C-alpha cells in the first residue's frame, strides 16, 4: 500500500508539474496578450492623435480657402469698379473732346470772320490765299488737339 501511495503521490506530483507548466504557459500567453493589447492601445492613441492633427490642418485649410475666396471676390469687385471708372473716364474724355472740338471750330470760324481784309478784297486772289491759310491753320490745330 505504501508503494501505491508513493505511486499516487508521484503521479500527483507529475500531474501538478504538468498543471504548473500549463499555468506558466497560460500566464505567458496572458502577458503576451496584455503586451499586444498595450501595443494596440498605443497604436490607437497614436492614430487618434494623427486624426486630430489632420482634422486641425483641414480646418485651417478650410479657413484659408474661405479667406482666399473672399479675396478673389473682392478682387473681382475691384476689377468691376475699375472697369466702371475707366468707362466713366472715357465718356468724360469723349465729352470734353467734343466740347473742345466745338470751341475750336467756333474760334476758327470767328478768326476767319474777323480777318482784317476789306470787303472788296474778298473776291481777290490774295483774300482766297489768306482764307485757305487760316483754314489750314485751323485744321492743324484741330488735328493737334486730337
Image (cartoon, rainbow, N blue to C red):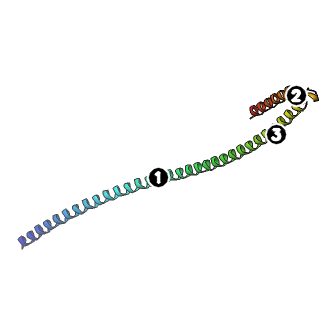
Residue 3 in the image, given as x and y percentages of width and height: 5, 70
Judged from this view, the residue extending furthest toward the bottom is 1
Tell me the quarter of the image containing the C terminus: top right
Report how far apart the C-alphas of labels 3 and 1 lie in the structure: 66 Å
Location of residue 82 (image quadrant): top right
At 90% from the left and 32% from the top, the residue drawn is 113
| Relative to 27, 120 lies left or right | right
Question: Is label 3 or label 2 in front?
Answer: 2
Residue 145 numbered tag: none
Within 10 Å of disc 2 (Cα), the crowding (few <14, some 14-19, many 20+) is few
Mark toward the start of the polypeptide (1 vs 2): 1
Which residue lies under the disc numbered 1?
54
Tell me the number on the disc at residue 99: 3
| Residue ID at (25%, 61%) | 29
In the picture of the structure, the residue carrying the numbered disc 2 is: 124
- Which label's residue is closer to the chain start, 3 or 1? 1
Depth check: 10 or 38 in front?
38
Residues under numbered marks 1 and 2 in contact, where contact means CB atoms less than 8 Å apart: no
Disc 3 + disc 2, Cβ < 8 Å: no
In the picture provided, is 6 more to the left or to the right than 53? left
Residue 52 on image: x %, y %: 47, 54
* Total number of numbered discs in the rendering: 3
Instruction: Indicate left or right for 45 with 92 as reference.
Output: left
Residue 47 x, y percent position in the rendering: 41, 55
Q: Which residue is more in the foreground, 141 or 72?
A: 141
Direction front: furthest residue = 124
For marks 3 and 2, the one nearer the N-term is 3
- Per the image, label 3 sits on a secondary structure element best described as helix
Judged from this view, the residue extending furthest toward the right is: 119
Dot 1: few (<14), some (14–19), or many (≥20) neighbours within 10 Å? few
Amino acid at each position: 500500500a505504501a508503494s501505491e501511495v508513493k505511486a499516487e503521490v508521484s503521479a500527483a506530483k507529475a500531474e501538478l508539474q504538468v498543471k504548473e507548466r500549463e499555468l506558466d504557459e497560460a500566464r505567458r500567453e496572458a502577458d503576451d496578450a496584455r503586451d499586444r493589447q498595450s501595443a494596440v492601445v498605443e497604436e490607437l492613441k497614436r492614430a487618434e492623435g494623427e486624426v486630430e492633427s489632420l482634422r486641425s490642418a483641414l480646418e485651417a485649410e478650410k479657413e484659408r480657402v474661405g479667406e482666399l475666396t473672399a479675396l478673389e471676390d473682392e478682387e473681382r469687385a475691384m476689377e468691376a469698379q475699375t472697369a466702371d471708372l475707366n468707362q466713366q473716364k472715357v465718356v468724360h474724355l469723349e465729352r470734353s473732346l467734343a466740347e473742345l472740338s466745338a470751341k475750336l471750330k467756333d474760334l476758327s470760324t470767328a478768326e476767319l470772320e474777323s480777318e482784317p481784309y476789306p470787303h472788296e478784297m474778298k473776291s481777290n486772289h490774295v483774300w482766297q490765299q489768306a482764307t485757305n491759310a487760316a483754314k489750314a491753320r485751323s485744321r492743324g490745330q484741330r488735328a493737334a488737339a486730337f
